[in-house]
Amino acid sequence: QAQLVESGGGLVQAGDSLRLSCAASGGTFSVYDMGWFRQAPGKEREFVAANHWRGGGTYYADSVKGRFTISRDNAKNTGYLQMNSLKPEDTALYYCAADASIGLDYHRGASWTYWGQGTQVIVSS
């Protein structure tokens, strides 16, 4: 049973960068698919990015493509979301997720088994 803890959120200005971290424990992180989701106030949770551990397939929401990068360091049992050129519309609570085999359902939050508690990102204009 994996436990996930996000960190790295904060208050930044538009155009700034942040790197979110997702520390995993209680499981073999290197064989888990990893994903990031976000939820803005009054909105539904939405997919941001995902990475398959096998084959390294990487996927992004259109809204973050070219600005965000998902990565992982299996030796540290940690996943990352590098966020560049942040916009006010990126303001949200960001969650990391993990699953033994998410396949092509990576964009569906309900498909992921393990979740962190979230880290807040606020981007001011």
Image (cartoon, rainbow, N blue to C red):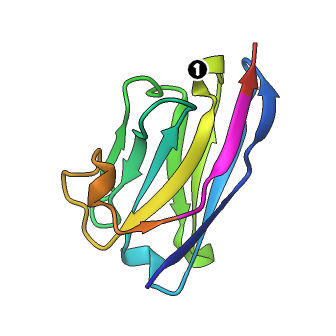
Please state the extent of the stretch shown in magenta in the rendering. Answer: 116-122
Specify the quadrant of the image occupied by residue 73: bottom right
Quarter of image, res 16: top right
Q: Residue furthest front?
A: 42
Q: Residue furthest left?
A: 104
Label 1: which residue? 89
Q: Residue at x 42, y 43 (%)?
A: 49
81 or 115, which is in the foreground?
115
Residue 117 or residue 69, whichever sits in front: 117
Q: Residue at x 25, y 68 (%)?
A: 101
Give the answer, above or below, for where 90 lies relative to 34. Answer: above
Q: Quadrant of the C terminus?
A: top right
Task: Quadrant for the N terminus, please.
Answer: bottom left
Percent across and percent down for residue 78 are 59, 67
Q: Which residue ends up furthest to the top in the rendered image?
A: 125
Specify the amino acid type for callout 1.
Glu
- Residue 39: image x %, image y %? 51, 39
Residue 4 against residue 40 in the figure, above or below: below
Q: Secondary structure at mark 1?
A: helix
